[in-house]
Image (tube, grey):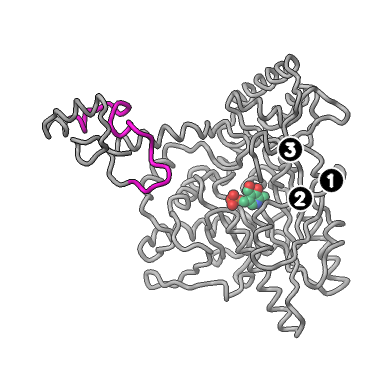
Amino acid sequence: MARIRGRRNGSPRRSFTYQILNNMSKNDSDRHEVEDDTYASGDFSQGAPKSKFPKSENNPRNAYALVHDELMLDGNSRQNLATFCQTWEEPEIHKLMDECLDKNMVDKDEYPQTAEIEARCVRMLSDLWNSDAGENAVGTSTVGSSEAAMLGGMAMKRRWEAKRKAEGKPYDKPNLITGPVQVCWHKFTRYWDIEHREIPLEGERFIMTPEEVMKRVDENTIGVVPTLGVTFTGQFEPVKAVSEALDQYQKETGIDIPIHVDGASGGFLAPFCAPELEWDFRLERVKSINASGHKFGLSPLGVGWVIWREPRDLPEDLVFWVNYLGGNMRDIALNFSRPGGQVVCQYYNFIRLGREGYAKIHGACYQTAQALAREVEKLGPFEIIFSGKEDEGIPALCWKMKDGVDPGFTLFDFADRLRTRGWQVPAYSLPADRQDLPVQRILVRHGVSIDLGMLLIKDMKEAMAYFKNHPQATPLTSEEASGFKH
Ligand SMILES: Cc1ncc(COP(=O)(O)O)c(C=O)c1O
């Protein structure tokens, strides 16, 4: 944005505004700087810079309005039913985030209280996930579950390497077994040269089973990663059954294979809404767990957690020790500088809500998800794959087209149509070997009320009526529809 000549250093554009401003005294010009209507100001007379680094300054009020307005095109995040991440926060969280703008999580010496708050969260999560570590709880905050998963995975690899070295065996062909996982595990195995044995989907089986895991284990398996809340359908994978199968395998072969649970979503759900479900450190074989604070941990975007069962499960060579306030503190994260506000807000949520508050909020989400599943089923052409039951998965619902039914539109068309009302209800193909099966999913999180859900159902009915009157000549593909990608 160039300034208009006469105000300081501007564009030579001889507009009407230019002529007015050129006849002004400096006082007039300064006054106009303050009083100008934003949208009639010189700063708005040309488009915002998009490639070339801007030459001159602009009025902050005008620059803000320009950026603010552009963000409107992102749509309304509260209607984004694809994301697992928080889109509504209490006013106190907004305040704390503002107060923490200057806190760098890595500067434990300069912000010792933020560091202390992080350590408290680590101990509380270790307790929530039933570790006996107590005051010796070991873990860290991260930027999200992806970083936390990498750290959990790296620890498994190091432990396996150390064992193989001690036994005088080769350690150049590590493999990792997972069900259908989020892309962070593809990144992990590729970045760290690990063979990824990802169990393909088959028929109506969309998650890992102990039988499928056991077909793939061997002495080079660094670990098995069940997901508590599979990204594609929302279902929990059977951690306990997999753990028992691995116990049996150890009895028969002597090979001890650890489990890391990807609890990105489920780690903050099951403890409150399905406390009987054994998936965490109650199972001896579970050595580490990751979860996203910014998903069902209810904190703002930018915080994840990884917790190890006990200190010996975290290999010492992954730890950097930093001195602060005369003490020694672990630094494990991959990143260096990162914001501390999200961690502070995580602690706020823990003390604000406790087990009771989390159970209430997530319980309401499960009820909404189940009610929506009943409504979607009633629409006619859809078959529910997962209906948001507490002990089977996360508060989400997932459906496909009924076999043999052609309502005149695809799920991709349906997703696209719902977007005209602002709703983002992703349709996508499942991973291998069911890429042939498109599904659609709704994530119900804090702030997706039953009322909002029923407004969506109304729009779904209207979308179906629209397609009845305007059958789709050329159905949309997944790429064309919503751009939604995992
Ligand atoms: C099961 C699972 N693991 C890991 C991740 C990555 O989490 P984050 O976005 O916090 O890095 C996700 C994200 O949706 C997920 O669903």
Residue 349 picture location, percent across and down? 50, 45
449 magenta-colored? no
Does label 2 or label 1 sit earlier along the sequence?
1
The answer to whether the beta carbon of the residue marked 3 is less than 8 Å from any atom of ligand 1 is no
Q: What is the distance, in whole Å, between disc 2 and disc 1 at their CAs? A: 11 Å
Residue where numbered disc 1 is placed: 205
442 vs 198, nearest the viewer: 198
128 vs 375, nearest the viewer: 375
- Specify the amino acid type for callout 3: Lys
Nearest-to-viewer mark from 3 and 1: 1
Q: Residue at x 39, y 47 (%)?
A: 52
- Specify the amino acid type for callout 1: Arg
Residue 32 picture location, percent across and down? 19, 29
Q: What is the distance, in whole Å, between disc 2 and disc 3 at their CAs? A: 13 Å
Span highlighted in magenta in the image: 32-54
Residue 373 picture location, percent across and down? 73, 29
Depicted 16 relative to depicted 186: above or below:
above
Depicted 132 relative to depicted 207: above or below:
below
Image side of residue 306 versus residue 300, left or right:
right
Q: Residue at x 87, y 61 (%)?
A: 215
Q: Residue at x 83, y 53 (%)?
A: 209
Residue where numbered disc 3 is placed: 389
Depicted 374 relative to depicted 366: above or below:
above
Residue at far top of view: 469
Q: At numbered mark 1, what does the secondary structure look like: helix, strand or loop?
A: loop
Residue where numbered disc 2 is placed: 237
- Specify the amino acid type for callout 2: Glu
